[in-house]
Image (spheres, coloured by chain):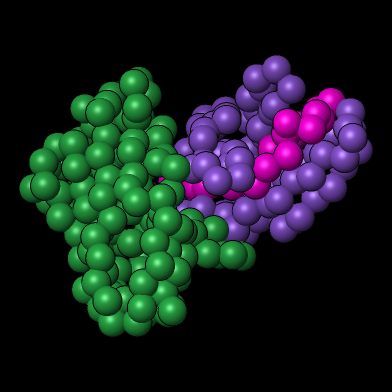
Chain colours: A green, B purple
Amino acid sequence: NAGVTQTPKFQVLKTGQSMTLQCAQDMNHNSMYWYRQDPGMGLRLIYYSASEGTTDKGEVPNGYNVSRLNKREFSLRLESAAPSQTSVYFCASPNDRREAKNIQYFGAGTRLSVL
Amino acid sequence: GENVEQHPSTLSVQEGDSAVIKCTYSDSASNYFPWYKQELGKGPQLIIDIRSNVGEKKDQRIAVTLNKTAKHFSLHITETQPEDSAVYFCAASSPSGTYKYIFGTGTRLKVLA
């Protein structure tokens, strides 16, 4: 049972390059989330998807796009990377079952550096 | 806007001592408060949580207390061990009902052997 799987684990980009961060969950959850983690700022929500086919902006969506490809997969795209997007990115998926509501399962993260 | 403050940002304790991390939230509608532990190179993992209808919850060496009136909640780790060294995050549910959370800024706990 892999839970939440993110790829790649590490990436270095030049300013202006584009890339897509991939996330997949095998827990049959409806919701999926993308966060970024910066020193001294905790985890900030970029985008989330409450169910297949829907996406919504979080706290810090500027510079990002997302795609909920199917129930399992939720990708995060940087169209034109900027140094301010240097961060560690986490995908997460909460357990939707009523008795286990709100428990978030996180992937291992993608460490992104934009030069 | 909604905010969660977490203190301290770093905490060093001797092995066997207790550690306490405190969080304050701003939205009185928040009703669920999880704590996550993040080990180096890994994603955060839930270690304990508490709902607003409960004042305290304990799981072996870990306990969480909630003071709804003061909008404070705290994580208590007793008999600390080196493997407790990690970054700990508190969070408060957002009242929008879509499972969104506001996270604290994290506490780096070091347990000195």
Residue under the point 73% across and 31% down: B83
Q: Quadrant of residue A20?
A: bottom left
Above or below residue A6? Residue B7 is below
The image quadrant of residue A30 is top left
Q: Residue at x 41, y 50 (%)?
A: A9
User: Which image quadrant: the C terminus of chain A?
Assistant: bottom left
Please state the total of marks drawn on the protein image.
0
Question: At which x and y percent is residue A17?
Answer: 27, 76
In the picture, residue A61 is in which quadrant?
Answer: bottom left
Image quadrant containing the N terminus of chain A = top left
Q: Is residue A18 magenta?
A: no
Please report the bounds of the magenta region as a residue range.
B74-94
* Residue in front for this viewpoint, A42 or A80: A80
Q: Position of residue B2 (x, y in %)?
A: 47, 62
Magenta stretch holds residue B91:
yes
Q: Is residue B110 left or right of residue B92?
A: right
Find residue B85 and report its horizontal and vertical position in percent.
Answer: 73, 39
Relative image position of residue B44 (x, y in whole percent): 51, 41
Residue nearest the viewer, comparing A115 with A91: A115
